[in-house]
Image: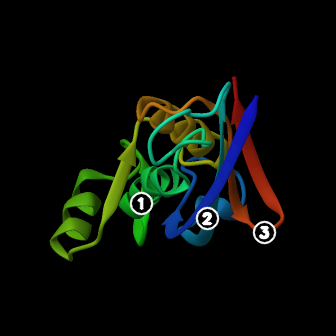
Amino acid sequence: MYILSTKSDFDSAHFLKDYDGKCANIHGHRWTVAIEAKGEKLKETGSERGMVTDFSELKKSLKKLTKMLDHSLLIEEGSLKPATMEAMREEGFRIMEFPFRPTAENLAKYFYDNMTEEGYSVVKTTVYETPNNAATYMM
């Protein structure tokens, strides 16, 4: 089996509603997302001969996802009052709402699921919220 790996970064803020600690307050991270995708055999013809898939395609797919989250506020649906959401949107803030709490663990699964939907045989995704703290999701 062959394993391909690539990474992409994005900057965003988040907070953890109802969390008992300093992460309950809005704070930012330089997130790094690492993905591993597998292939059983190499392509035998065409310009991708000798490859599982072209690295540029794998990187482009991951970058598309990280770019959507870059320079935004990641929040769980319903975690801010409607008036707060309206005021922030009126000010032009970019807010990405998720049906889950925006933890590194949940974001790892989010990237795993989305890259799988893009057609990759994902082995695992790892989301670093700091250079030393990461969460990995794999099936």
Q: Position of residue 85 (x, y in %)?
A: 26, 59
Provide the residue designation for mark 2. 31
Residue 138 placement: quadrant: top right
9 relative position to 129: left or right: left
83 relative position to 114: left or right: left
Q: Which structural element holds mark 3?
A: loop
Q: Which structural element holds mark 2?
A: strand
Q: Where is residue 59 in the image (x, y as percent from the top left)?
A: 51, 56
Identify the residue at the far left of this view. Answer: 90
Q: Residues within 10 Å of mark 1 (few under 14, many from 20)?
A: many
For the point 55% across and 42% down, the residue is 49
For the point 59% across and 36% down, the residue is 109
- Label 1 is placed on what type of residue? Leu
Provide the residue designation for mark 1. 69
CA separation, marks 2 and 3? 9 Å
Provide the residue designation for mark 3. 131
- Label 2 is placed on what type of residue? Trp
Res. 55 in view: yes
Is tag 2's residue or tag 1's residue first in the polypeptide sequence? 2
* Label of residue 39 in the image: none
